[in-house]
Image (cartoon, rainbow, N blue to C red):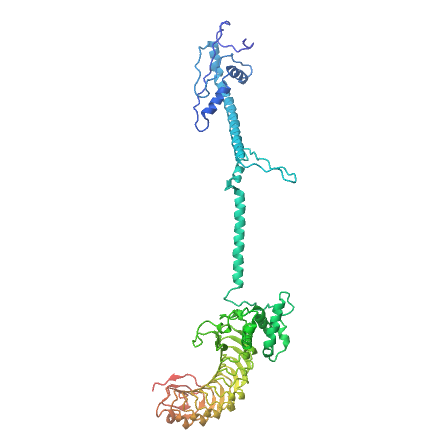
């Protein structure tokens, strides 16, 4: 090989006939990195660059312009990065040239070799990954043939290196892809949630802790599309049996008006009451009437707002519409029966609102009715049909109007105190010959007719405190010889004390205070009231002395009078309490 025409000369000229020995530039040794290159990769690189001619050509190409190296002056290492070639005998001129350019040439060769090695390794890695994906596709089940409509079968998905993460989505568990498992689990969760919600609404609508009939949205007997012929027939059958009784003095139109309490109660009985459902013939007429009447009480009293439901409108006998406590217990609440018929109703402080419906008189055998402490208003309807009623307690409500004239003569205990009744006590009450307790305190009554008192031979307790009673104390009270407690305080009574009260020898409590118009002296006959324990006559206009009447035997436990102040209005040395002439500034008498 002839040297290039413009070879760079340095130092003394050499003999042209002498072939300069090849110069092997010092190539920095590179230690193999176990983390980045394997022995296999090094072998691949060495096999590619073993040809000395290729290395020489590469050296010539990378030399600076105007400079060329002597062929054979550089010999590449046998193993890249592992050892350096042993230098040959150096020619002085060539050595000088090598000393000038060997570092730059070695750096270029090294850079080019590293780049070629990196590209070769990258292609090898991609080839291996392609082989692995092909192996996986061969193990997968064969794709189905083309469908009948000509749709070609799906082609195998040969992923590139960038698409490799998608292979994880096709990972199979028990023969089903992971993505399919996710869909199946989601569907299962939705089904379970729907089942739980369905059970919740089912048991909410069929709870045994509340009535099953809607309060204000009941179905019409004939026009509702949801009612079949069987229900309509049941409506007519029950109406034919008890219609004449439950209509009372009303018009039949009330059973066609969805807003009336009667319609709601009868619709519940026909459509919603599943007790002996469709077999009303098993119930007696009285049982049907009682279920209807109590349903009217429930709907009229806004039963959904009651404090305690007491099993009302449950699918059991009305005799079980209670709290399970014996009717003899003070805590008994609800409906109780005797011989299969309703005899006892007690709903005290239970939040009843509205008026007492007249249908309550359909409970023919009712003996005890206690509705104290509710929010009932309006007038008390006629209860004359309750011929067995003995106890009627409706105190602490909001009842107004005149007292009911028509009450069953069987009543023995009548308590209507703390309401807003007006007018006079009805004379018709003289028929209540069994009455022994009459409580009418804290109303707005204005008159106490003596006519009704005289026949009440069994009366033992009469409480008329805190009304607007006017006039004198009736002398007819003297005929009530069994009377034990007489409360007439805080009214507007006037006149003298009747001597006839001296015949009340069983009287233990006589309270007359707060009647500022009662005047005169205390009759001496009152000394016969030897059972008297409480006598309060302060705040009246009585005068004189009561020492000879009550202080001789000193049998009264509590005696209060206007025996203080100046001037002294009433003389009493044995009084336990003395007040001024106005009935105020009372003090205990320590003498």
Q: Position of residue 306 (x, y in %)?
A: 51, 70
Question: Residue 138, can we see it?
Answer: yes
Please tell me which residue lies in front, 591 or 424.
Answer: 424
Q: Is residue 243 above or below residue 43?
A: below
Q: Is residue 474 above or below residue 7?
A: below
Q: Residue furthest left?
A: 591
Q: Is residue 533 left or right of residue 127?
A: left
Q: Position of residue 315 (x, y in %)?
A: 52, 69
Q: Is residue 406 left or right of residue 89?
A: right
Please tell me which residue lies in front, 84 or 316.
Answer: 316
Q: Is residue 158 above or below residue 376?
A: above
Name the quadrant of the N terminus.
top right
Name the quadrant of the C terminus.
bottom left
Q: What is the count of numbered marks?
A: 0
Q: Position of residue 67 (x, y in %)?
A: 54, 14
Please tell me which residue lies in front, 322 or 479.
Answer: 322
Question: Residue 295, can we see it?
Answer: no
Q: Position of residue 189 (x, y in %)?
A: 52, 51
Query: In terms of image quadrants, where is residue 218?
Result: bottom right
Please tell me which residue lies in front, 141 or 374.
Answer: 141
Q: Is residue 444 above or below residue 103?
A: below
Query: In terms of image quadrants, where is residue 281?
Result: bottom right
């Amino acid at each position: 090989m002839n040297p290039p025409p413009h070879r760079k000369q340095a130092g003394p000229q050499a003999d042209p006939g002498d072939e300069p020995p090849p110069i092997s530039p010092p190539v920095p040794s590179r230690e193999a990195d176990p983390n980045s290159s394997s022995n296999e990769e090094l072998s691949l690189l060495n096999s590619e660059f073993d040809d000395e001619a290729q290395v020489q050509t590469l050296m010539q190409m990378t030399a600076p312009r105007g400079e060329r190296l002597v062929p054979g002056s550089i010999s590449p290492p046998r193993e890249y990065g592992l050892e350096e070639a042993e230098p040959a005998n150096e020619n002085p001129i060539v050595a000088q040239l090598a000393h000038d350019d060997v570092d730059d040439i070695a750096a270029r060769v090294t850079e080019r070799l590293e780049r070629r090695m990196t590209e070769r390794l990258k292609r090898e890695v991609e080839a291996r990954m392609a082989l692995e994906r092909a192996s996986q596709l061969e193990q997968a089940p064969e794709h189905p043939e083309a469908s009948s409509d000509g749709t070609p079968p799906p082609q195998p998905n040969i992923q590139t290196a960038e698409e490799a993460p998608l292979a994880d989505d096709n990972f199979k568990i028990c023969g089903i892809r992971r993505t399919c498992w996710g869909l199946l689990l989601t569907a299962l969760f939705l089904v379970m949630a729907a089942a739980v919600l369905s059970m919740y609404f089912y048991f909410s609508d069929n709870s045994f802790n509340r009535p099953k009939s809607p309060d204000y949205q009941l179905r019409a007997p004939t026009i509702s599309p949801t009612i079949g012929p069987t229900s309509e027939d049941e409506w007519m059958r029950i109406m034919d049996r008890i219609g004449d009784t439950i209509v009372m003095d009303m018009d039949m139109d009330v059973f066609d008006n969805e807003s009336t309490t009667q319609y709601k109660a009868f619709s519940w009985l026909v459509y919603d009451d599943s007790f002996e459902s469709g077999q009303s013939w098993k119930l007696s007429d009285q049982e049907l009437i009682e279920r209807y009447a109590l349903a009217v009480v429930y709907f009229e009293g806004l039963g959904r707002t009651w404090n305690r439901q007491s099993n009302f409108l449950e699918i059991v006998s009305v005799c079980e519409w209670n709290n399970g406590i014996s009717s003899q217990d003070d805590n008994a609440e609800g409906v109780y029966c005797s011989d299969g018929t309703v005899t006892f109703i007690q709903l005290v402080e239970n939040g009843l609102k509205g008026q007492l419906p007249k249908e309550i008189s359909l409970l023919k055998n009712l003996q005890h009715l206690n509705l104290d402490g509710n929010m009932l208003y309006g007038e008390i309807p006629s209860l004359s049909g309750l011929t067995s009623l003995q106890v009627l307690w409706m105190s602490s409500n909001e009842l107004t109007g005149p007292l009911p004239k028509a009450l069953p003569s069987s009543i023995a205990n009548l308590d209507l105190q703390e309401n807003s009744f007006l007018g006079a006590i009805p004379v018709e009450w003289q028929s209540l010959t069994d009455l022994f307790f009459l409580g009418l305190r804290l109303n707005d009554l204005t008159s106490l007719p003596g006519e009704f008192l005289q026949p009440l031979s069994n009366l033992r307790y009469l409480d008329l405190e805190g009304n607007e009673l006017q006039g004198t104390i009736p002398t007819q009270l003297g005929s009530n010889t069994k009377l034990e407690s007489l409360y007439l305080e805080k009214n507007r009574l006037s006149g003298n004390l009747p001597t006839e009260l001296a015949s009340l020898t069983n009287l233990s409590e006589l309270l007359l205070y707060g009647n500022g118009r009662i005047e005169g002296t205390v009759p001496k006959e009152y000394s016969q009231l030897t059972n008297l324990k409480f006598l309060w006559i302060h705040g009246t206009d009585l005068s004189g002395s009561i020492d000879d009447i009550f202080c001789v035997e000193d049998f009264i436990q509590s005696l209060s009078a206007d025996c203080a102040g100046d001037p002294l209005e009433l003389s009493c040395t044995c009084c336990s309490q003395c007040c001024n002439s106005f009935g105020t500034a009372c003090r205990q008498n320590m003498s």
